[in-house]
Image (tube, rainbow, N blue to C red):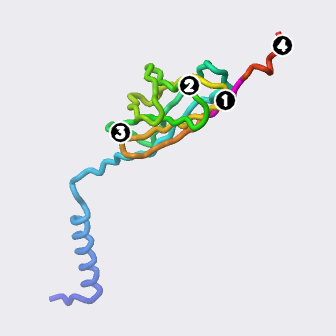
Amino acid sequence: MKKITFKRALALSAWLAAIVLMFVACDNELDVKQVYSFDLETMPVQKRITEGETVEIRCRIVREGNYSETAFSIRYFQPDGKGELRLDDGTVFLPNDLYPLDKTVFRLYYTSCSTDQQVIDVYIEDSFGQTVQKTFSWQNDSGSDDEGEE
């Protein structure tokens, strides 16, 4: 009969512990990541605007990953000036109200209603509570620079 040495016993118990850990650590459930970070990309926007003028803001939500159940919504706040913001489908936004976004590529249209400096903060939120904020600002374009030129 072979004698079991201390080294063999230690090696055997290490192997048994490893096998037990493999079975305990595994489960049959698939881990699905649902929350991915995202950002709002926009094309450059003009810096000057006149009262009554409309500016187009081309937007795209860029996601780190894609979970099909993620829903996005939009809201805005206007700390300076007065204007109207609407979505490319014609929806006119009220400040601080939350509106669903049905697509990740869209256009916003801002129409100036004052001659003051104007600033809007646009917030995009996902269904997991993550928020991205972008600020757009315009100076009044009185047209005085172009007077005298023909």
Main SS of residues in magenta: strand
Height in image: 86 above or below 14?
above
> Which of label 4 and label 1 is nearer to you?
1
Secondary structure, mark 3, is: loop
Q: Which mark is residue 116?
A: 1
Mark-to-mark CA distance, 3 and 4: 53 Å
Residue located at (48% from left, 26% from top): 106
Q: Is residue 140 above or below residue 13?
A: above
| Alpha carbon distance from label 3 to label 1 | 38 Å
Instruction: Check disc 1 and report its element: helix, strand or loop.
Output: loop
Q: Which residue is mark 2?
A: 110
Amino acid of disc 3: Thr
Amino acid type of the residue that numbered disc 1 sits on in the rendered structure: Asp
Q: CA distance from mark 2 to mark 1?
A: 14 Å
Which of the pair 111/6 is nearer the observer? 111
The answer to whether residue 17 is left or right of residue 102 is left
Mark 4 to mark 1: distance in Å? 25 Å
- First-in-chain label (2 vs 1): 2
The residue lying at 57 percent from left, 22 percent from top is 111
If you read the primary sequence from the N terminus, does the residue marked by circle 4 or circle 1 appear first? 1
Q: Which mark is residue 149?
A: 4
Q: Nearer the viewer, residue 39 or 66?
A: 39
First reached walking from the N terminus: tag 3 or tag 1: 3
Give the Cα distance between marks 3 and 2.
27 Å
